[in-house]
Amino acid sequence: MPFAQYNNTAAAFADDPVATHPTISPQSERPTLVADPVARERADQAALLRVVIATITHFFGPLASFMTRVSDPRDPEKITYSLPALLFTGLLLFLCRLGSRRQVTHLLRNGVSAANFHSLFGVEMCPHGDTLNEAFCRLSPDQMQAEVSSLAETLIRKKVLYPYRVLGRFYVVAIDGTQIYTFHTRHCPHCLTRTTRDGKTLYYHTVLEAKLVTPTGFSFSLMSEFIENPAPNPTKQDCELKAFYRLAHRLKARFPRLPILLSMDGLFAGGPTFTLCQQYGWKFMIVLKDDDLPSVNQEFAALKALMPGDKLRFRTGQQLEITQLYQWVDSITYVDSDQQQHALSVLECHETKPSAEGRQTTKFKWITNLAVAAKNVRELASDGGRIRWKIENEGFNTQKNDGFALEHAYSQNETATKVFYFLLQIAHLLFQLIERGSLLKQVFEDGCGSAKNLAYRLLEAWRNCLIDTHVQDLLTHRRFQIRFDTS
């Protein structure tokens, strides 16, 4: 049954257990016409909270049992807050984009928020921000990583991502690294280091991400590999290439039969990557720069002039103002430094579009182990090659600059920082499902504004709307659909 069909009554309000706050229930819906602006705002908050709970429970089950596979190392007799309560608080920190543990203490521990924690987890109130830190110092980052991968696997198994496969088969996994924390003094034994021009030493941490990306803007963390030194002052520091080989091994072990197309930048264009993908049965689209793999570039330049049939011109844009010229050459033989032979294809795109100076042409070029033809060249270029920028824009940029505060160190403890990092990845995944899902659009036809505004409204909804004790069970057992725009 569609979600909207059984939400057909106005928002209900509690009689007065905690003032006159609205109760979030499966039957509550945003009224279309409410004269009282205060009542309208309360109804909107109840509707938003219902959408959030419904989306999460629809895909992953009740909130109270979320991430229950993470082991709790604490003494059960000394526990005030259950581990699901602590982890859910961490998710709220990022879903509401609070920016720091201190804001958890100031904004979530009183009033209706405390009552909601009692309703969901049977605790007196929301845990203190320092309580989160102390507990997370003792958790297993590997188990948190398993939870992140499990959420992505659930979406794959439920065929949520089927419409976004390239060539009707391959899931695009973008690989890229980003810096997450910087310190002026050593944070932990595993810090990377670099010296500035004025002679000062900076200590920093980076991470290599494998994210499932789609043309519509989804960017879900599939697996992470922290780039870190094994001990202080190593002879050679860890780097993205070393991290990629570790990440690839883990990715294949966790998703052995997943048809993957890796989308990567030119750093990874080399024999070891080609060999690894051949062993694992993966396809790839890797940026090919003019000064990389000289023999491949030279053969491509020579052969494309002799193969005029392997060319496609296409016009796109709202007024067909953009011209794309595709050229490709298949079956280029490349011999790496280990004397291993690889059969590769090169695909080049010259895109010309209007600019302030007139017409501007940009060149894109990739190397791939897929056979390129006129019938698939545009899909490979757009959804396999250029889509790599999704990990930068919808991935890292959103997490750094749109309120998730990825570059903020939520703890000084190296284990806790990783737990917070994985909670951020989970919250980002959930937020994308909520923001882009049909439930939100059914209730708020005009939208909720920017993502930051939606996060703020979610915070206010959590602080002002009481959650009915039966709401999760009812939403879990109700049958409804959540659709996403596939255009």
Image (spheres, rainbow, N blue to C red):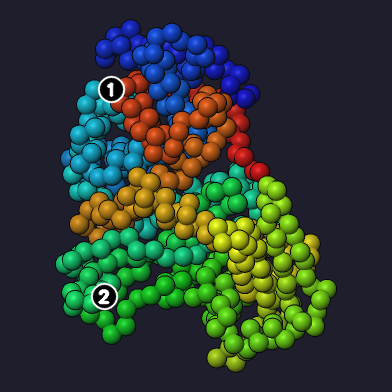
Q: Position of residue 279 (x, y in %)?
A: 60, 75
Q: For the C terminus, which image quadrant?
A: top right
Instruction: Look at mark 2 in the image and give the residue it sits on.
Output: 194
Q: Marks 1 and 2, how far apart in space? A: 47 Å
Which numbered mark, 1 or 2, is in the foreground of this view? 2
Q: Residue visible at 30% across and 65% down?
A: 205
- Mark 1: amino acid: Val
Q: For the N terminus, which image quadrant?
A: top right
| Whether residue 278 can be seen here | yes
Asked which secondary structure carries label 1, the reply is helix
Identity of the residue furthest to the right in this view:
309
Q: Position of residue 65 (x, y in %)?
A: 40, 37
In this rendering, the answer to whether 38 lies above or below 180 is above
Q: Residue visible at 55% across and 82% down?
A: 292
Q: Nearer the viewer, residue 22 or 445?
A: 445
The image shows a total of numbered marks equal to: 2
Numbered tag placed on residue 318 in the rendering: none
